[in-house]
Amino acid sequence: MKQVLAFIFTLIVGGLMILSLNNNALFTEYGENNPEDTYSDSYIDRDVRDNNDDVIYGESEGLESAPANIVTAIVADYRSFDTLGEITVLFISSLGVALLLGGKKKERMALNYSPNFMLRIGSRALFGIILMTGVFMAVHGHLTPGGGFPGGTMIASSLLLLYLANDEFRTKVQGFKLLESFAGIAYVAIGLAGLYISGYFLENFLPTGTIGELFSAGIIPIIYVLIGLKVGSEITGIIDNFLTEEAL
Amino acid sequence: MINVIEIVLSVLLVILAFIAINSQSLIKSVMLLSGISMLAVVAFVLLKAPDVAVTEAVIGSGLVTSLFVFTLLSFRKTGDIQ
């Protein structure tokens, strides 16, 4: 019975998947898309700064939304308040894990396997690469796909690798807690600065610069780096809580 | 050409998901889940959502899989000698 139900469910989900992947009406090839078919004209002709010119990568200056990655423009600029809420959700889940599993005296949980030579050395070599990729992703969040959330998670997974390879290893959890608090407070402080300077919470009050450069888009890269630090330290805290136990 | 890739991808996703649900061994299920995540990354790229693809690659097939594998490796079965 359970198998039949599972089979029917997978068939339904699979049919939906094939439909969505095989339907090229909404997801046309690059350059062939005609936005007037999909969106309302009032969104296409939206004009806030009296500047309706084409946006050219590496040349346009002083745009309303300066990140080259449009998803970042939504996540960290127009809907930045939502992102603050997401960060709070992650903070509360990390707090819950700490309340359930955190104790006073904590020790590393003994691993059921003994890490061999290849695992120990290979994890140390990979740790740096994964950490660098995570930091790159968080810093270049306004230019390339990715951003603070995957970047922070990548930083945390590099530390998880060290945890898995060495059963003596523990990070300095206190430092991560400080970093997390600092990043959260700094995010809200930037929002309040926008409220004070421009009159709106989390308003982009810095000059936006040329689109496509690393130092552009005003407060968006700063916010994304802070999000990366906060997510990374929170998930590292969760992992540390999972992999430690109270000393007997 | 890309149409064939899309259809093969979606059929593989469904088959892997069904085997993952019905697998007797937990570690096999976790590995299949990781495989589904990797295929989902390709699907997201085909659907022109690179941001979601990056997040899925990092969280779905990186963090979640390693946490599951670690948990499976570190819990003690009932009846094991301490």
Image: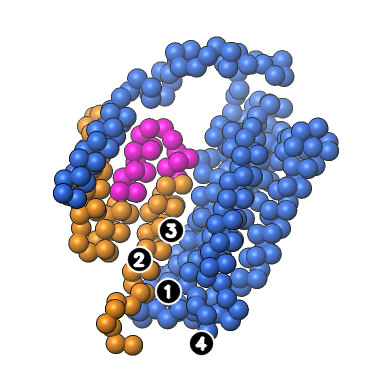
Chain colours: A blue, B orange
Task: Say what secondary structure mark 4 lies in.
Answer: loop
Q: Does the segment drawn in magenta span residue A229?
A: no
Residue B63 image label: 3
Residue B69 image label: 2
Chain where mark 2 sits: B
Q: Of circles 3 and 4, which is in front?
A: 4
**Discs 1, 4: same chain:** yes
Task: Say what secondary structure mark 2 lies in.
Answer: helix
Measure the alpha-carbon separation of dots 3 and 4.
29 Å
Q: Amino acid at mark 1?
A: Ala
**Percent position of residue A223, x then y:** 67, 45
Residue at position x 51%, y 50% in the image: A150
Measure the alpha-carbon separation of dots 1 and 4.
24 Å
Chain where mark 4 sits: A
Q: Residues within 10 Å of mark 1 (few under 14, many from 20)?
A: many
Residue at position x 31%, y 45% in the image: B39
Which span is picked out in magenta?
A: B36-54
Q: Which label's residue is closer to the chain start, 3 or 2?
A: 3
Residue A165 image label: 1
Q: Residues within 10 Å of mark 4 (few under 14, many from 20)?
A: few
